[in-house]
Amino acid sequence: MTWLSWRQFRTQGATVAAILAVLAVLLLFVGLDLRHLYSVSGLATCASNPNCGGSNYDAFLSHYVPVRQLLGPLLLVLPAAIGVFWGAPLVAGELESGTFRMVWTQGVSRTRWLAVKIAVVGTASVVVTALASLVVTWWYSQIDQINNSRFQSDIFNERNVAPIGYAAFAFALGLCAGILLRRTLTAMAVTLVGYIAAQAVVMTSIRPRFMAALHATGPIEPPPGAIAVAKGGLPPKALTDPGDWIISNSVTNAAGHSVTNIEIRPDSECANTGHCLADYHQNITYQPASRYWSFQWHEFGLYVGLTAVLIGLSFWLIRRRLS
């Protein structure tokens, strides 16, 4: 049974493995050159401070821009592709064609049949994504150190362990959709929509609540000229550290009410800007940069939990609802 499952999957698996190997070799050479540029630029001694390196900072980030533009979306697309092209057709294709009956009549139980398919293709999905994440995370390491914004969604979702959880979830979602719907194309469409919806919900509503956010309140520092407060508040400045994830940023008046769209100028009516700002405070809700790895593991665990639920549901559907 294991051999049969591997034979059905080996062409796809070998193709993806070959593409990943070629990509890894190319990125190895480019990444080593990027590390050399980082070393000779002097930025290693002042990472996360754009003013420290001066023109070297912008010069370093200008290297390999096309590679970054192509590589960046890889770990956003890969888990979804795994769910759509590996997960959804895995069982739906056999249910649609009726070939599953031949295996079931050869003394192979439904549970074992499904378990072997999950073991072969599911494991391949996780391994491929883990290797891709390792390569991408390594390649971007110096750039991420300089940008110091690992909580940014397009960076957080493409690095370290989170993409592995996404791939496992997408595969399980496709598998379950295929068993439930029994139509390959329909299952593929549902998998894609479901995966995108899950990502959106987690990013906007669940991830910010993995750990209780911290709050910082402080006076507004008087600027040298005019100051305008619009929706979104002011730059956090000294209230937070570089790399912190700013969840909310607002300005309140003496009564504690949020204010927007106000403008204060150091003119004749308000010659002392500091005095004019005395009744206003900046309020920031944030997650400190030091919690990055905690959030990575929380998100990984969430998606692994969802994967387990979907896999369990798939086994239940195979045993109870298919004939």
Image (cartoon, rainbow, N blue to C red):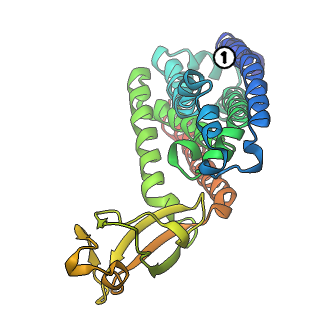
Residue with the mark numbered 1: 16
Q: Position of residue 248 (x, y in %)?
A: 42, 66
Q: Position of residue 256 (x, y in %)?
A: 32, 86
Q: Position of residue 299 (x, y in %)?
A: 60, 53
Q: Residues within 10 Å of mark 1 (few under 14, many from 20)?
A: few
Judging depth in this view, the residue of 37 and 87 nearest the camera is 37
The N terminus, quarter of image:
top right
Q: Relative to 145, is 88 on the left or the right?
A: left
Q: Farthest residue to the bottom: give it.
A: 255
Regarding residue 1, the answer to whether it shows in the image is no
Regarding residue 19, the answer to whether it shows in the image is yes
Q: Farthest residue to the front: give it.
A: 268
Task: Classify 97 as above or below 290.
Answer: above
Q: Relative to 61, is 46 on the left or the right?
A: right
Residue type at mark 1: give it.
Val
Task: Classify 77 as above or below 242.
Answer: above
What residue is drawn where x is 40% and y is 21%?
185
Task: Classify 146 as above or below 17.
Answer: below
Q: Relative to 18, is 73 on the left or the right?
A: left
Q: How many marks?
A: 1
What residue is drawn where x is 72% and y is 51%?
46
Task: Classify 296 as above or below 61.
Answer: below
Q: Farthest residue to the left: give it.
A: 269
Q: Position of residue 35 (x, y in %)?
A: 77, 32
Judging depth in this view, the residue of 86 and 107 nearest the camera is 86
What residue is drawn where x is 30% and y is 82%?
276
